[in-house]
Amino acid sequence: MEDLDDSGSGEIVITKENFGGMFGDEQTLKYILKEYSNDIRQELYNLHSNCYNSAYENEIYEDIWDELSTFFEGRSEWESRPYKYDTTKTQHYVTVKIRDIAGDIKQFLSEMKGSNYSTDSLEYYGSYMGMLKYGMDNDIWEYLDFRVPDYPDSSKVDEYINQDFENYF
Protein backbone atom coordinates (compact mmCIF):
# COMPACT_ATOMS: atom_id res chain seq x y z
CA MET A 1 0.00 0.00 0.00
CA GLU A 2 2.87 2.34 0.79
CA ASP A 3 4.14 1.92 -2.79
CA LEU A 4 0.89 3.42 -4.08
CA ASP A 5 1.19 6.58 -1.93
CA ASP A 6 3.11 8.81 -4.35
CA SER A 7 2.68 12.03 -2.39
CA GLY A 8 3.54 10.67 1.05
CA SER A 9 0.24 12.05 2.39
CA GLY A 10 -1.16 8.68 3.43
CA GLU A 11 -3.87 8.88 0.77
CA ILE A 12 -4.00 6.47 -2.09
CA VAL A 13 -5.68 7.30 -5.35
CA ILE A 14 -7.20 4.26 -7.02
CA THR A 15 -6.59 4.37 -10.75
CA LYS A 16 -7.23 1.99 -13.60
CA GLU A 17 -3.52 1.12 -13.59
CA ASN A 18 -3.14 0.29 -9.88
CA PHE A 19 -6.58 -1.26 -9.30
CA GLY A 20 -5.60 -4.73 -10.51
CA GLY A 21 -2.42 -4.71 -8.45
CA MET A 22 -4.23 -3.70 -5.27
CA PHE A 23 -6.79 -6.45 -5.53
CA GLY A 24 -4.40 -8.99 -7.03
CA ASP A 25 -2.22 -9.03 -3.88
CA GLU A 26 -3.84 -11.16 -1.15
CA GLN A 27 -2.41 -9.21 1.79
CA THR A 28 -3.46 -5.88 0.34
CA LEU A 29 -6.93 -7.19 -0.43
CA LYS A 30 -7.41 -8.49 3.13
CA TYR A 31 -6.25 -5.15 4.55
CA ILE A 32 -8.59 -3.15 2.30
CA LEU A 33 -11.56 -5.37 3.08
CA LYS A 34 -10.89 -5.21 6.81
CA GLU A 35 -10.33 -1.45 6.99
CA TYR A 36 -12.56 -0.08 4.26
CA SER A 37 -15.16 -2.73 3.48
CA ASN A 38 -18.16 -0.60 4.53
CA ASP A 39 -17.01 2.38 2.48
CA ILE A 40 -16.16 0.25 -0.54
CA ARG A 41 -19.43 -1.65 -0.30
CA GLN A 42 -21.40 1.62 -0.14
CA GLU A 43 -19.53 3.12 -3.09
CA LEU A 44 -20.00 -0.01 -5.19
CA TYR A 45 -23.68 -0.11 -4.23
CA ASN A 46 -24.07 3.54 -5.31
CA LEU A 47 -22.28 2.87 -8.59
CA HIS A 48 -24.50 -0.13 -9.33
CA SER A 49 -27.66 1.73 -8.31
CA ASN A 50 -26.88 4.72 -10.51
CA CYS A 51 -26.02 2.53 -13.51
CA TYR A 52 -29.08 0.32 -12.95
CA ASN A 53 -31.38 3.36 -12.87
CA SER A 54 -29.73 4.92 -15.94
CA ALA A 55 -30.07 1.69 -17.92
CA TYR A 56 -33.73 1.37 -16.89
CA GLU A 57 -34.57 4.99 -17.74
CA ASN A 58 -32.78 4.78 -21.09
CA GLU A 59 -34.55 1.54 -21.99
CA ILE A 60 -37.97 3.07 -21.26
CA TYR A 61 -37.02 6.25 -23.13
CA GLU A 62 -36.05 4.20 -26.20
CA ASP A 63 -39.27 2.15 -26.01
CA ILE A 64 -41.38 5.34 -25.86
CA TRP A 65 -39.62 6.88 -28.85
CA ASP A 66 -39.91 3.63 -30.82
CA GLU A 67 -43.67 3.75 -30.28
CA LEU A 68 -43.89 7.48 -31.04
CA SER A 69 -42.17 6.82 -34.38
CA THR A 70 -45.61 5.68 -35.59
CA PHE A 71 -46.52 9.36 -35.90
CA PHE A 72 -43.24 11.27 -35.53
CA GLU A 73 -39.83 11.22 -37.19
CA GLY A 74 -36.64 11.44 -35.19
CA ARG A 75 -36.46 12.77 -31.66
CA SER A 76 -37.63 15.96 -30.05
CA GLU A 77 -35.37 18.97 -30.12
CA TRP A 78 -35.25 22.12 -28.03
CA GLU A 79 -35.50 25.42 -29.85
CA SER A 80 -35.16 28.89 -28.39
CA ARG A 81 -36.59 32.03 -29.93
CA PRO A 82 -37.01 35.59 -28.69
CA TYR A 83 -40.53 36.57 -27.65
CA LYS A 84 -42.41 38.27 -30.47
CA TYR A 85 -43.17 41.46 -28.49
CA ASP A 86 -40.23 41.51 -26.07
CA THR A 87 -36.98 40.44 -27.70
CA THR A 88 -35.12 40.64 -24.37
CA LYS A 89 -36.95 37.48 -23.26
CA THR A 90 -36.60 34.01 -24.74
CA GLN A 91 -39.21 31.31 -25.33
CA HIS A 92 -38.19 27.65 -25.33
CA TYR A 93 -40.01 25.06 -27.43
CA VAL A 94 -39.81 21.33 -27.89
CA THR A 95 -40.25 20.39 -31.53
CA VAL A 96 -40.59 17.08 -33.33
CA LYS A 97 -41.29 16.40 -37.00
CA ILE A 98 -44.68 14.86 -37.81
CA ARG A 99 -44.28 11.82 -40.07
CA ASP A 100 -47.40 12.17 -42.29
CA ILE A 101 -49.66 15.03 -41.25
CA ALA A 102 -51.51 15.14 -44.58
CA GLY A 103 -52.22 11.40 -44.46
CA ASP A 104 -53.37 11.60 -40.83
CA ILE A 105 -55.75 14.49 -41.60
CA LYS A 106 -57.14 12.66 -44.64
CA GLN A 107 -57.70 9.53 -42.56
CA PHE A 108 -59.40 11.54 -39.80
CA LEU A 109 -61.70 13.32 -42.27
CA SER A 110 -62.49 10.07 -44.07
CA GLU A 111 -63.49 8.34 -40.81
CA MET A 112 -65.63 11.30 -39.66
CA LYS A 113 -67.31 11.87 -43.03
CA GLY A 114 -71.05 12.31 -42.68
CA SER A 115 -71.01 12.92 -38.92
CA ASN A 116 -73.01 15.88 -37.64
CA TYR A 117 -71.22 16.15 -34.28
CA SER A 118 -68.97 19.16 -33.85
CA THR A 119 -66.34 16.99 -32.16
CA ASP A 120 -66.07 14.97 -35.36
CA SER A 121 -64.91 17.97 -37.38
CA LEU A 122 -61.29 18.96 -37.84
CA GLU A 123 -62.03 22.57 -36.85
CA TYR A 124 -62.94 21.43 -33.33
CA TYR A 125 -59.31 20.60 -32.52
CA GLY A 126 -56.67 23.22 -31.94
CA SER A 127 -53.72 20.93 -32.44
CA TYR A 128 -52.47 17.82 -34.15
CA MET A 129 -52.16 16.15 -30.74
CA GLY A 130 -55.81 16.89 -29.96
CA MET A 131 -56.85 15.33 -33.26
CA LEU A 132 -54.67 12.26 -32.55
CA LYS A 133 -56.09 11.79 -29.07
CA TYR A 134 -59.66 12.01 -30.32
CA GLY A 135 -58.79 9.63 -33.16
CA MET A 136 -57.31 7.12 -30.72
CA ASP A 137 -60.32 7.46 -28.42
CA ASN A 138 -62.60 6.72 -31.39
CA ASP A 139 -60.64 3.85 -32.99
CA ILE A 140 -59.26 5.75 -35.96
CA TRP A 141 -55.77 4.92 -34.74
CA GLU A 142 -54.63 2.41 -32.18
CA TYR A 143 -53.34 3.76 -28.90
CA LEU A 144 -49.60 3.90 -28.57
CA ASP A 145 -48.56 0.85 -26.62
CA PHE A 146 -45.33 -0.34 -25.10
CA ARG A 147 -44.35 -2.56 -22.22
CA VAL A 148 -42.54 -1.14 -19.22
CA PRO A 149 -39.93 -3.75 -18.29
CA ASP A 150 -39.69 -5.03 -14.73
CA TYR A 151 -35.94 -4.39 -14.76
CA PRO A 152 -33.34 -3.17 -17.23
CA ASP A 153 -31.26 -5.28 -19.58
CA SER A 154 -28.40 -6.61 -17.44
CA SER A 155 -25.89 -6.23 -20.27
CA LYS A 156 -26.69 -2.48 -20.37
CA VAL A 157 -26.20 -2.23 -16.60
CA ASP A 158 -22.83 -3.98 -16.97
CA GLU A 159 -21.89 -1.68 -19.85
CA TYR A 160 -22.75 1.43 -17.81
CA ILE A 161 -20.83 0.13 -14.78
CA ASN A 162 -17.75 -0.47 -16.93
CA GLN A 163 -18.05 3.01 -18.47
CA ASP A 164 -18.57 4.79 -15.16
CA PHE A 165 -16.27 2.79 -12.91
CA GLU A 166 -13.06 4.73 -13.49
CA ASN A 167 -14.89 8.08 -13.26
CA TYR A 168 -16.79 7.13 -10.12
CA PHE A 169 -13.91 6.66 -7.71
Image (cartoon, rainbow, N blue to C red):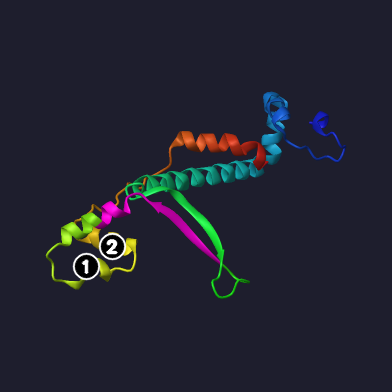
Instruction: Tell me the crowding category of disc 1: few under 14, some 14 to 19, or many 20 or more residues within 10 angstroms, Cα based.
Output: some
Residue ID at (20%, 60%): 109
Q: Amino acid at mark 2?
A: Met
Q: Amino acid at mark 1?
A: Ser
Residue denoted by label 1: 121
Classify mark 1: helix, strand or loop: loop
Farthest residue to the bottom: give it.
85
Closer-to-camera residue (100/9): 100
Q: Position of residue 44 (x, y in %)?
A: 60, 41
Residue denoted by label 2: 131
Q: Is residue 60 magenta?
A: no
Residue ID at (22%, 58%): 108
Quarter of the image for residue 114 reads bottom left
Numbered-mark total: 2
Q: Position of residue 110 (x, y in %)?
A: 17, 57
Upstream in sequence: badge 1 or badge 2: 1
Classify mark 2: helix, strand or loop: helix
Q: Could you tell whether 52 is left or right of 149 in the image? A: right
Q: Could you tell whether 130 is left or right of 46 in the image? A: left
Q: Position of residue 87 (x, y in %)?
A: 60, 71
Q: On screen, 88 above or below 24?
A: below
Residue ID at (66%, 40%): 167
Instruction: Tell me the crowding category of disc 2: few under 14, some 14 to 19, or many 20 or more residues within 10 angstroms, Cα based.
Output: many
Quarter of the image for residue 5 reads top right
Farthest residue to the right: give it.
8
Give the residues drawn in magenta, as a range.
91-105
How many angstroms separate mark 1 from mark 2 (CA)?
9 Å
